């Protein structure tokens, strides 16, 4: 908030003046808000752009002197030292600055929270922007009950919290309508889609699950009671895929060849495979090798029996046990290593 003395000349937009606050002095450019010139004796809102870094807080007072000759022409009070980037050239900061000038502590804090939108205002930034000590900030936060939501160390406007809440349900609903073969949307995918701060997102999901409006299953978020709905040709394709691998034992066909033989398009076929993998009916050991879980269970039983003979296992012995060629043996051994069924020691394995 800037006031000119009646004796001063009018001040034009982007004029440079000497700026004094406490023992600090620098030169600032005055950018007018709401006009191209400030008349003598008038008060208005402006942004002061110093050529040197300053250490000031809202409420600090200052005086300005004409650039040349150096005479006092006015002064004012700091309202905000943390301006956010303007969203557009037409964005009006005057209502916000008027609250900073005339509002109560609660109104000032709420305005700062609201301008941060879905990212919210951290307690640390609130202290930095206002200059209030933590106990004072905590008291003001209590005054905002009903108008702001405190989540962890971050404040969000009540309207923002409610908007994110309804948006979460709408996004999950839209995803499941578009993806009937999916059991839910990935948690991080949903958060990125909503462009929401992690803290408010987690709080919203917790709130919606407690209200039984959403369900969380592992990393998947879904509507309550959601089940995969398949069309006739999709259900038939699912049976075909499962049978192709169940009947093959460990000498499985390439996944791409199984999918190419289906009557449905590749995208839907891939989703069915994802469903079978998620339900652990099929197990993927490499990019193009998929096995039925029953075959892998049988393999584990064979290895358990072989351990009694000798725990040491080389590739040749494994090929005989599994009845497969090297093409399948190496990916299977690497899978068994990951599953801690075997452990590699040099070129051999130990059956654990």
Image: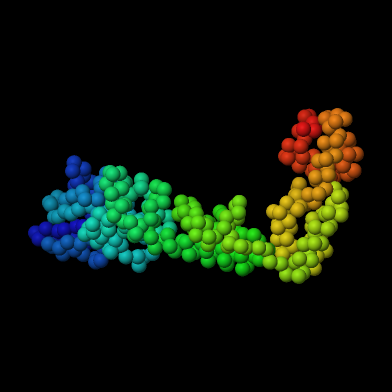
Residue plotted at (87% across, 53% down): 248
**Along the viewing direction, whichever of 89 and 164 lies nearer the viewer:** 164
Residue extending furthest toward the left: 7
**Along the viewing direction, whichever of 143 and 163 lies nearer the viewer:** 143
Residue plotted at (84% across, 32% down): 307
Please identify the quadrant where the C terminus is shown: top right
Picture coordinates of residue 237, whole percent (x, y): 78, 64
Picture coordinates of residue 214, whole percent (x, y): 55, 60
Picture coordinates of residue 283, whole percent (x, y): 75, 50
Residue plotted at (13% across, 55% down): 73
Q: Can residue 291 be seen in this view?
A: no
Please identify the quadrant where the N terminus is shown: bottom left
**Along the viewing direction, whichever of 15 and 109 lies nearer the viewer:** 109
Q: Is residue 101 visible?
A: yes
Does residue 72 appear left or right of residue 99 in this picture? left
Does residue 331 appear left or right of residue 134 in this picture? right
- Applied colour scheme: rainbow
> In the figure, 74 relative to 310: above or below?
below
Does residue 146 appear left or right of residue 58 in this picture? right
Marker count (numbered): 0
Does residue 59 appear left or right of residue 327 in this picture? left
Residue extending furthest toward the bottom: 232
State the image quarter where residue 31 is shown. Answer: bottom left
Picture coordinates of residue 18, whole percent (x, y): 20, 50
**Along the viewing direction, whichever of 294 and 59 lies nearer the viewer:** 294
């Amino acid at each position: 908030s800037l006031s000119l003395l009646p004796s001063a000349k009018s001040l034009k937009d982007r004029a440079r003046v000497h700026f004094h606050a406490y023992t600090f002095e620098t030169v600032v450019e005055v950018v007018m808000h709401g006009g191209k010139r400030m008349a003598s004796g008038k008060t208005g809102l402006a942004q002061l752009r110093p050529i040197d870094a300053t250490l000031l807080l809202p409420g600090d007072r200052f005086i300005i002197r004409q650039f040349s000759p150096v005479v006092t022409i006015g002064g004012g009070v700091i309202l905000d030292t943390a301006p956010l980037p303007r969203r557009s050239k037409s964005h009006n900061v005057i209502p916000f600055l008027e609250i900073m000038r005339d509002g109560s502590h609660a109104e000032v804090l709420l305005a700062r929270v609201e301008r941060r939108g879905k990212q919210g205002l951290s307690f640390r930034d609130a202290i930095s922007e206002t200059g209030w000590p933590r106990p004072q900030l905590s008291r003001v936060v209590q005054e905002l009950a009903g108008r702001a939501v405190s989540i962890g160390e971050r404040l969000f406007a009540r309207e923002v919290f409610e908007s994110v809440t309804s948006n979460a349900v709408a996004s999950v609903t839209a995803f499941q309508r578009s993806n009937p073969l999916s059991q839910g949307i990935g948690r991080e995918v949903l958060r990125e889609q909503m462009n929401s701060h992690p803290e408010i997102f987690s709080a919203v999901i917790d709130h919606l699950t407690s209200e039984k409006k959403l369900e969380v299953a592992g990393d998947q978020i879904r509507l309550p009671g959601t089940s995969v709905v398949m069309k006739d040709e999709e259900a038939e394709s699912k049976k075909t895929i499962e049978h192709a691998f169940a009947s093959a034992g460990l000498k499985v066909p390439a996944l791409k060849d199984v999918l190419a033989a289906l009557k449905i398009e590749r995208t839907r076929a891939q989703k069915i495979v994802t469903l079978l993998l998620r339900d652990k009916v099929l197990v993927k050991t490499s990019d193009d090798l998929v096995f039925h879980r029953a075959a892998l269970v049988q393999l584990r039983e064979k290895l358990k029996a072989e351990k009694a003979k000798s725990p040491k296992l080389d590739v040749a012995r494994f090929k005989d046990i599994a009845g497969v060629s090297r093409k399948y043996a190496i990916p299977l051994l690497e899978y068994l290593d990951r599953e801690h069924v075997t452990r590699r020691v040099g070129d051999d394995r130990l059956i654990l």
